[in-house]
Image (cartoon, helix red, strand yellow):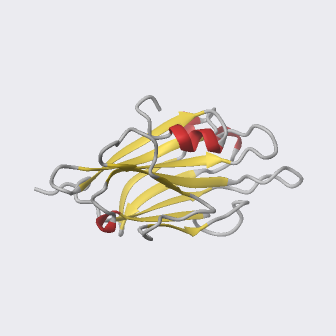
């Protein structure tokens, strides 16, 4: 029997938000994916994918990157082709971090935030970050490969307070 959360093959993680008010520093949210090896699923990430990097094999790509939230539709879009990911990897954690170049900014200070995780036309999860309004970053999804090789999806919105670099290093730990 198949469920909407099993046998995940290709997903999109999409984020949108409103631009900052005139004269205020830009709102810049970034999607980050951390890939973990099968022999250390809670160790350090094998690699990260974000605005200035990509996966070595092309299975995780950032298709759209915004530094301001201006425009129509979703401002950041990342595609994860889990069905093509090497068997060496058993876990992928996806998060969203707010750039902190111009001071401390939280999700509660940014208007109309939305994160959506989709497989094709099916929405797996959607959230507005209101539960983590005081956070500067949040884990939004976890994909785990089971013993049969199928990928499962675990929705999760867990807040984090810190800079994007420290978030990327710890976002997949057991304590995050």
Instruction: Name the residue at 49% across, 43% down.
Output: 139
Q: Is residue 129 visible?
A: no
Q: Please state the horizontal and vertical placement of residue 150, each as a whole percent of the image.
A: 21, 57
Residue 155 horizontal/vertical position (percent): 37, 45
Check the image and name the residue furthest to the top. Answer: 175
> What residue lies at 62% left-to-right and 61% top-to-bottom?
51
Residue 118 seen from this side: yes
Q: Residue furthest left?
A: 1
What percent of the width, then of the height, locates residue 142?
A: 38, 47
In the displayed structure image, the side of residue 94 where residue 153 appears, left or right: left
Up-down relation of residue 40 to residue 66 (above or below): above
Residue at the outermost right position:
23
If the image is split into quadrants, where does the N terminus sit? Answer: bottom left
Q: Position of residue 45 (x, y in %)?
A: 46, 47
Task: Please name whichever residue, 161 or 156, is drawn nearer the observer in this view of the structure.
Answer: 161
Give the total number of marks visible in the rendering: 0
Residue at the spot x=71%, y=41% of the render? Answer: 109
Whether residue 111 sits left or right of residue 41 in the image: it is: right
Residue at coordinates 34% horizontally, 43% vertically from top-left?
A: 41
């Amino acid at each position: 029997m198949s469920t909407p959360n099993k046998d995940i093959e290709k997903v999109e993680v999409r984020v949108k938000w409103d631009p900052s008010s005139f004269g205020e520093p830009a709102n810049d949210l970034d999607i980050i994916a951390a890939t973990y090896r099968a022999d250390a699923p809670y160790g350090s990430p094998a690699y990260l994918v974000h605005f200035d990097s990509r996966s070595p094999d092309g299975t995780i790509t950032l298709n759209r990157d915004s530094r301001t939230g201006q425009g129509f539709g979703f401002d950041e879009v990342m595609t994860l082709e889990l069905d093509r990911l090497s068997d060496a990897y058993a876990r992928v954690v996806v998060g969203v971090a707010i750039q902190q170049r111009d001071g401390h900014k939280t999700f509660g200070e940014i208007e109309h935030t939305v994160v959506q995780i989709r497989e094709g036309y099916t929405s797996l999860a959607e959230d507005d970050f209101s539960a983590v309004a005081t956070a500067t970053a949040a884990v939004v999804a976890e994909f785990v490969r089971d013993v049969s090789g199928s990928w499962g999806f675990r929705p999760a919105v867990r807040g984090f307070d810190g800079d994007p670099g420290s978030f990327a290093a710890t976002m997949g730990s057991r304590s995050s």
